[in-house]
Image: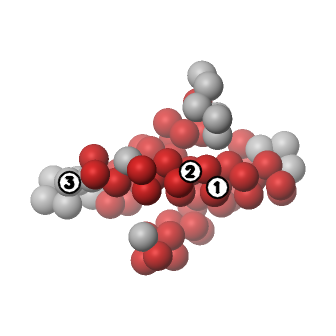
Amino acid sequence: MGVLYDETIGWVYPLACRAAEDTSGAQELTQAFYLHLWADSRQFRQDTDSAVTWVLQRLGEHLRSGADGRA
């Protein structure tokens, strides 16, 4: 997960900043996303999924639903 974080934080955090009202909110959103990603990691299929596409799809879902999972 450390490598995945290092490779994706450059996309995730700026998008969280755009979605949140302030830096604190963006940090909370980012942290919640990576926790969600970790919990959902069994859904990733290395033989058929692109890691970048998988992460960005999950990020889009997460940002649309909000950090607390509400729609």
Could you tell me if residue 56 is visible in this image? no
Q: Is residue 52 left or right of residue 46?
A: right
Looking at the image, which residue sits at the far top? 71
SS of the residue under disc 2: helix
Q: Amino acid at mark 2?
A: Phe
Task: Report if the CB atoms under discs 2 and 1 are less than 8 Å apart.
Answer: yes
Q: Is residue 55 above or below residue 61?
A: below
Amino acid on which the number 3 mark rests in the picture: Arg
Measured in 3D between alpha carbons, the distance from the residue under mark 2 to the one under mark 1, in whole angstroms, is 5 Å
- Number of disc labels: 3
Q: Secondary structure at mark 1?
A: helix
In this figure, which residue is indicated by the disc labeled 1? Answer: 30
Residue 59 percent coordinates (x, y): 51, 46
Residue at 58 percent of width and 58 percent of height:
12
Residue found at the far front of this picture = 39
The label on residue 51 is none
Is residue 33 found left or right of 2 in the rendered image? right
Residue at x-position 68% and y-position 49% = 29
Determine which of the numbered discs, if any, sits on residue 33 in the image: 2
Residue 18, percent across and down?
73, 47
Describe the element under mark 3 as helix, strand or loop.
loop
Say which label, 1 or 3, has the lower sequence index: 1
Q: Is residue 39 rendered to the left or right of residue 18?
A: left
Q: Which residue is mark 3?
A: 45
Q: Amino acid at mark 1?
A: Thr
Q: Foreground residue, 36 or 20?
A: 36
